[in-house]
Image (cartoon, rainbow, N blue to C red):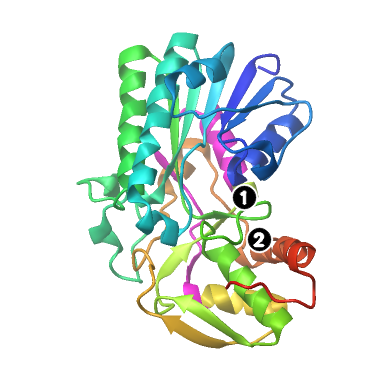
Amino acid sequence: MSNDVILVAGGGGFIGGHLVADLKAKGFERIRSVDVKPFDDWYQVHEGVDNRVLDLQELENCREATRDVARVYNLAADMGGIGFIEMNKALCMLSVLINTHLLMAAREAGVEKFFFSSSACVYNADKQRDPRVVPLKEADAYPAMPEDGYGWEKLFSERMCRHFTEDFGIATRVARFHNVYGPHGTWEGGREKAPAAICRKVILAKVSGRHEIEIWGDGLQTRSFMYIDDCLEGVDRIVNGEVPEPVNLGSSELVTINELVDIVEEIADLKLQRNYKLDAPKGVNGRNSDNDLIREYVGWEPSVRLRDGMAKTYAWIWDEYVAKYGAGKAATTV
């Protein structure tokens, strides 16, 4: 397999950049990394990799990207944190073109295995109304009532993977990611997710001396957050295992957003006044990952403690913040 071409679609993104690094570390020699962003906007650009800027919403670009490829990792999507998802539903839906055209091109190219990164946003909203949520099992995606826009696109693309397997014999694998975080990701600008956003806000409070923080919602909404190393390990096990249906890939360590702020405050050695923006986007009230099925299929589940992963993430964002704004200056936005 080390001599076959591997395509990482969305390789300029947060998870994609880490995946390319992981594949290189495992000894894969022919990796093609594709993203729509110009190289200057890629989170990581790796030497010795066939890096290409292509818009994979276009079928011809997907044909170019999959030429001579044996395995596809599709991580490409137009997405961000809850604020971006709720304000850009049409853009999120258009990502269906990426998976549609990649699957079509993969079939033409004789691709052996196709991985699709789905999301916990596919789950029925009625099962996520209580912060004391029962962990979501894979079957809870139906009857369908996913996150509007982004969730519908992911659920539709899951079904497309299933039918390409049934009708055309492509071995597809689907993982439903639960809130992946870590270094080398978005931490400002509107697309960042809660862990990075809270790190940035705490850093801003520390640097500026204004010891307060704005929290979207009442802070009682619950989530689980998966560190990037666990994500990469899970993807590897799912792709190389016999996993014939979509499975959760997420930590089962449930916390409230208030508790996530507690963790970052402890890391920063700081206590802040909390101001709650109750009219801000906050997503579902509760979401957690049931890991019975992934344990059954691959004998493993994510295990990195949130406190440990957040310490590494905070340290990286601190360095990025200081490099951009200086240790004695405050960013103009929160």
Quarter of the image for the N terminus: give it: top right
Tell me what residue is drawn at x 41 percent, y 77 percent.
220
Q: In the image, is residue 330 above or below residue 239? A: below
Q: Residues within 10 Å of mark 1 (few under 14, many from 20)?
A: many
Q: Which residue is under mark 2?
A: 309
What residue is at 19 percent from the left and 46 percent from the top? 143
Query: In the rendered view, does 44 fall on the left or right side of 164?
Result: right
The image position of residue 31, as x and y in percent, is 67, 24
Q: Which of the two labelled residues, at mark 1 and mark 2, occupies the earlier sequence position?
A: 1
Asked if the magenta segment contains residue 6, the reply would be no
User: What residue is pinned by disc 1?
Assistant: 228
Q: Nearer the viewer, residue 52 or 67?
A: 52
Residue 4, can we see it?
Answer: yes
Look at label 2 and name its amino acid: Gly
Above or below 267: residue 72 = above
Q: Give me the C-alpha separation between circle 1 and circle 2.
A: 8 Å
Pointer 1 with pointer 2, Cβ within 8 A: yes
Q: Is residue 246 magenta?
A: yes
Is residue 159 found left or right of 263 in the rendered image? left
